[in-house]
Image: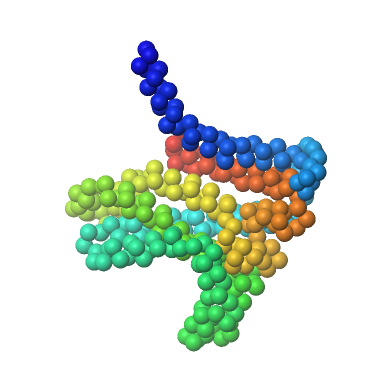
Amino acid sequence: MKRMMRRNNIGWLFIIIAVLAISLFYFYPMIQALLLSFQSGRGTNMEYVGLDNYIRLFSDPTFRSALFNTFLYLIIQVPIMIVLALVFSVLLNDPTLKFRGFFRTAIFLPAVTSLVAYSVIFKYMFAGDGIVNKFLVDLSIISEPINWLSDPFWSKVIIIIAITWRWTGYNMIFYLSSLQNVDHSIYEAAKIDGANAFQRFTKITIPMLKPIILFTSIMSTIGTLQIFDEVMNITSGGPGNATLSISQYIYNLSFEYTPDFGYASTVSYVIVLLVVVLSIIQFRVAGDKK
């Protein structure tokens, strides 16, 4: 008994630092933010306002714009990114493909690129006198430069392209590592039975990658709901809040506008609620009832 107790105590010594760090830097701020969402003020003289901040959400046009934009990014960008990652992983898993290592590295490289650096590059590339407009004009695809960053529609397109460019390779690595464990004889048997490439992809690859697809879908959903760097550095939320995200709105409430940390905390808990609800929906759609 003493030996078991000593072993348990040693186990706790190994994890106690991690438990304290997680509690201090994760759970404590989450609880404080929740309490702060029921208050109003600039940080020094906070007063309790009950549910007023939550009621204010329903009459806040800027919040509705940020919520709409974020959901638009989510429903368009995440499916495109997941499909592209799946296609790339299948293509780069082909043992007969030459220079596989180069292509894998090239597609994954954007995932380790600095968020701020690539956002600034995208901003200059799609500027009125940027390389994209020059290229399209030289090829006579367009007759005059497109105002990518000052047009509400095209500015959203740029944000979606930027996110897809950065995170597709990241998700591809998960699928590719899973495909390494799939016996190629399964595909060969299906091919002998007459299954074409599309049938092998939908009937073999996708079912086998179902847990990983669920994982990457949830992680991509969380990441898109928290999108900040791209919007902040490429369009600054403009033009006229056309690309404003929820996270940037939280930043503006805290540091750009007259500071209102209570209302900013309220908006941040909207992201928490959306993450929980959408994760549950994705689990249900995937058929995982655990």
Image location (x, y in percent) of residue 258: 78, 55
Towards the viewer: 88 or 34: 34
Work out whether 225 lies above or below 142. above
Q: Quadrant of the N terminus?
A: top left
Q: Is residue 48 above or below residue 97?
A: above
Residue at x 60%, y 80% (from the top left corner): 128
**x, y percentage for residue 264?**
70, 48
Question: What is the number of callouts on the image?
Answer: 0
Residue at screen point 44% across, 27% down? 12
On the rendered structure, is 112 left or right of 35?
left
Residue 162 is situated, as x and y percent measured from the top left of the image, at 51, 65
Q: Report the front residue among 205 and 102.
A: 102
**Quadrant in which the C terminus appears:** top left
Q: Toward which corner of the image does residue 153 lie, by quadrant?
A: bottom right
Q: Quadrant of residue 262?
A: top right
User: Does residue 57 show up?
Assistant: no
Q: Determine whether, in the image, residue 166 is placed left or right of residue 187.
A: right
x 65%, y 43%: residue: 269
Q: How is the image coloured?
A: rainbow
Q: Residue at x 35, y 16 (%)?
A: 3
Q: Is residue 59 visible?
A: yes
Looking at the image, which residue sits at the far top?
Answer: 1
Whole-percent x and y of residue 236? 64, 65
